[in-house]
Amino acid sequence: MIVNAAPSLRQIATEVWKPLALLFVWDCAVTITYFILPFRAPSLPLTLFGSALALFLGFRSNSSYQRWWEGRILWGAMINASRSLARATRNFLPDPAARGIKREIIKRQIAYVNALRCQLRRQSFDERVTGFIEERDKGLALARANAANGLLDGTGRRVDIARREGWIDTIQQTQMERMLVDISNAQGGMERLKNTPLPIQYRFLPTLFTHLFCVLLPIGLVETLGLATPLGSTVAGLMFLAVLRIGDDLVDPFANSVHDVPLSAMCRTIEIDLLQAIGDDAPAPDQPVRGVLW
């Protein structure tokens, strides 16, 4: 997630220079052809086309932002549920004999959120996953098709062990299970966003119409703007291409790009809160790298 108050000019140039260069070359070609060859540019209803396209792109961008914001809400719910689980584990298991299982439940939750982060970003598991689970569990939970869900199932089994050992009662077990259900529901929402793209009509048609409009734009403007057509047409086309790119950037909030939800930073927030809940040393929060919080 870009956290700078103002966007980086370098980042903007990196993303738009290719379509902008192609558009400028086309505008120049149309302008040169108009002055060399004796033809009259057709009168195109560009205002009508542009208004309809703007509505189309605006609706698509709003849909993409809603997906991005829902991803952020789901991770906010994950942070809250993780804190609640750690607090309940610490308060429900004060018995010194339960110290080991208490610490294991809390550390497994740290491993769980990091495993979920890696799954959503299609990355291999790193030390922020493997470093918080027992060696004997790495070949069990992490070998499952859905490793994050395997870690969560293991946490549920440890809560049941605590109940069978008499460290918690059934009411406390139910409360902790309710927190695990909230965590599972948040994970399901994230997987739905990741695995369900926008309908093909939302992805293909706006791209087609925007590119077609940019092709027609200098043809309709050259008679009015004359030699200024490359500048005016390129700037106008850039605005439509920028809105199109915004929708592409936000449609997947877990794409491991500079525009996605800062999963690493939020997992580190959970790690800090849960380690401090059991009195362990916690790392420092993640900081932006060149204006991007990962």
Image: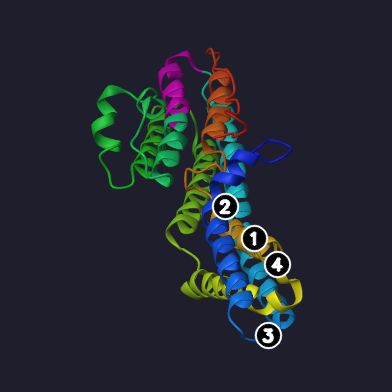
Sequence-wise, the earlier of marks 4 and 3 is 3
Q: Is residue 27 above or below residue 156?
A: below
Direction from residue 125 to residue 266 in the image, left or right = right
Depth order, front residue of 285/167: 285
Question: What residue is shown at x 43% (from left), y 46% (from top)?
Answer: 120
Q: Residue at x 72, y 78 (%)?
A: 223
The answer to whether the residue labelled 1 contacts the one labelled 3, judged by CB atoms less than 8 Å apart, is: no
Q: Indicate whether residue 38 is drawn in magenta.
A: no
Quadrant (top left, top right, bottom left, bottom right) of the N terminus: top right
* Kind of residue at badge 2: Val
- Separation (CA) of disc 2 from disc 4: 24 Å
In the rendered structure, find residue 44 and report the number of the disc placed on it.
3
How crowded is the residue under tag 1: few (<14 C-alpha within 10 Å), some, or many (20+)?
some
Instruction: Please name the amino acid that badge 4 sits on.
Output: Leu
Q: Position of residue 207 (x, y in %)?
A: 53, 69
Q: Residue 227 shows which numbered tag?
A: 4
Any part of residue 216 in sight: no
Q: Is residue 189 left or right of residue 48?
A: left
Cα–Cα span, label 4 and label 3 = 19 Å
Q: Are marks 2 and 1 in contact (CB under 8 Å)?
A: yes
Earlier in the chain: of badge 1 and badge 4, it is 4
Instruction: Give the residue pinned by disc 2.
Output: 16
Tell which tag, 3 or 2, sits nearer the viewer.
Answer: 3
Helix, strand or loop at label 1? It is: helix
What residue is pinned by disc 1?
A: 238
- The magenta segment is 95-108
Of badges 1 and 4, the one in the foreground is 4
Residue at (60% x, 29% y) in the render? 288
